[in-house]
Image (spheres, rainbow, N blue to C red):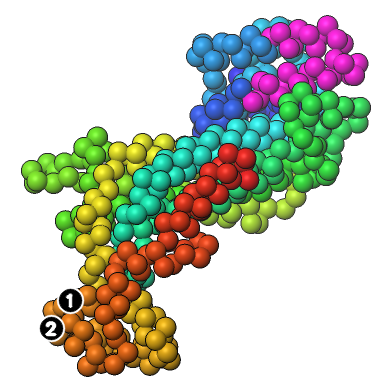
Amino acid sequence: MAKLWGGRFSKLTDGMVDDFHSSISFDKRLYQQDIEGSIAHATMLGEEGIIPREDAERIVEGLRGILADAKADRIHWMVDAEDIHMNVETILIERIGEAGKRLHTGRSRNDQVALDVRMYAKIACRDTEHLLEELIRALLDIARENLHTIMPGYTHMQKAQPITLAHHLLAYVQMFLRDRTRFRAARASADVMPLGSGALAGTTYPLNRQRVAELLDFSAITQNSLDGVSDRDFILEYLAAASICMMHISRFCEELILWNTAEFRFVEMDDAFATGSSIMPQKKNPDVAELIRGKTGRVYGDLMGLLTVMKGLPLAYNKDMQEDKEAFFDARDTLVKSLAVFTAMLKTVTFRKDVMERGASGGFANATDCADYLVRKGVPFRDAHRVVGELVAYCLGEEKALLDLSLEELQRFHPSFGEDVYDAISLKSCVEKRAIPGAPAPEMVSVAIDEAQRRLDDGN
């Protein structure tokens, strides 16, 4: 078919070029944004008298018909029409005739695609925020039920100090709250209307850009036409936020995978979110968590791919930038699916409180508290640290825990030990004494839950 831009050319585009050049296979996803943007543009053109009002009305009516048909899957998108913009315009001209040829007055595909992707990005950010909020609510519900569920905290994957499950989960709440903030920032970056930038240098037509921004619910307009068509920072910000968010989910998945092993047994995965083995009948594999962990690298690749595309582009628009959409769409789809299935899976996980508490009793998680006990008795911390280190070495040789030692054994290492040491280094005491803001004492965690709920509810 003849191209709408083909006046300067004497030959048809080679079929291989049509196929290589075309983006309709993926940018058809933008049909609603493209049509809504065109409706706003045509409305403004008619209001400003740039095109006859009756032509503007026919264009708007025609575009609404195309939108209805597209939603009903009654549109055949044409590869040789290249992209969603040319497809919509071609169909419009076929339907309404000469008036349709006026739609593109005062704009370029360069600012048109920038508009479409910004509109899509705003929706993608908002949808992602809502999924994060659902996940945070699920975490807060589980945390409220586990204020007193003691478990080991780790550093270097070695048991370090006792904490609570609620405290552990709240660490992820903080991560996901930060993620929501990042997506809100990406949405704010996308919320700037570029139409009117033209191909790169604006237009001689007296466009009312503020009116188009108002019709499309943008809070501002772009301030430089070169930047307006070549800026993809808002997509990169979404991809960066998505990469960080996937990293957070992946870390959580890694812990659930470990906790689900026979060696840990801290959790039991629900049958609906696990799979079996084709050869080993005993297996129950945490495939959902593993897939999310694997898909994290895919989102990283989307970010790095677009960063690499953009790094060497001179101003203004270049065809390389067509590569932005597949990366964006893939990252958005991967993140949205991962968040949804992760939240559903998390709600079904059984946390084995008894096993967690037994796990906290091993590995000398109360050793720091034992040293602090001696410090409160007047022993310098470095001396207390050495004494407890010697105690741990003794316990390893005797296959005992600190709480298993008799007072006589303890006093061989330092005379300051008294009967009150056993209460001081009990797991319950180790947790409850950590009662400063941000620490795992149940009263502090309860405050932290309320604060996280407040931030979730008021949007901060």
Q: 333 or 399: nearer the eye? A: 399
Q: Magenta part mainly helix, strand or loop?
A: helix
Q: Report the front residue among 110 and 30.
A: 30
- Across and down, in percent, residue 366 comes to 31, 73
Q: Of tags 2 and 1, which is closer to the observer?
A: 1
Residue 75's image quarter?
top right
User: Which residue is painted at 43% across and 67% down in the image?
Assistant: 434
Looking at this view, name the residue that lies furthest to the front: 419
Q: Residue at position x 50%, y 41% from top? A: 132
Q: CA distance from mark 2 to mark 1?
A: 10 Å
The magenta stretch spans residue 54: yes
Write the residue at 54% across / 20% down.
77
Give x and y (percent) for residue 415: 29, 92
First in sequence: mark 2 vs mark 1: 2
Disc 2 residue type (three-letter): Glu
* Quadrant occupied by the N terminus: top right
What residue is shown with label 1?
404
Mark 2 neighbour class, 10 Å CA radius: few under 14, some 14 to 19, many 20 or more: few
Q: Quadrant of residue 116?
A: top right
Residue at (53, 35) in percent of width and height: 130
Question: Is disc 1 placed on a helix, strand or loop?
Answer: helix
Q: Nearer the viewer, residue 318 or 448?
A: 448
| Residue 15 drawn at (x, y percent) | 53, 29
Mark 2 secondary-structure assignment: helix
Does the magenta run of residues contain 108?
no
Instruction: Determine which residue is flagged by label 2.
Output: 398
Please state the extent of the stretch shown in magenta in the rendering: 33-62
Q: Is residue 3 visible?
A: no
* Horizontal arrangement in the rendering, residue 282 relative to residue 270 (left or right): left
Q: Residue 69 at what x, y percent from top left? A: 56, 11
Question: Can I make out residue 88 in this image?
Answer: yes
Instruction: From the viewer's side, name the closer residue of 223 and 176.
Output: 176
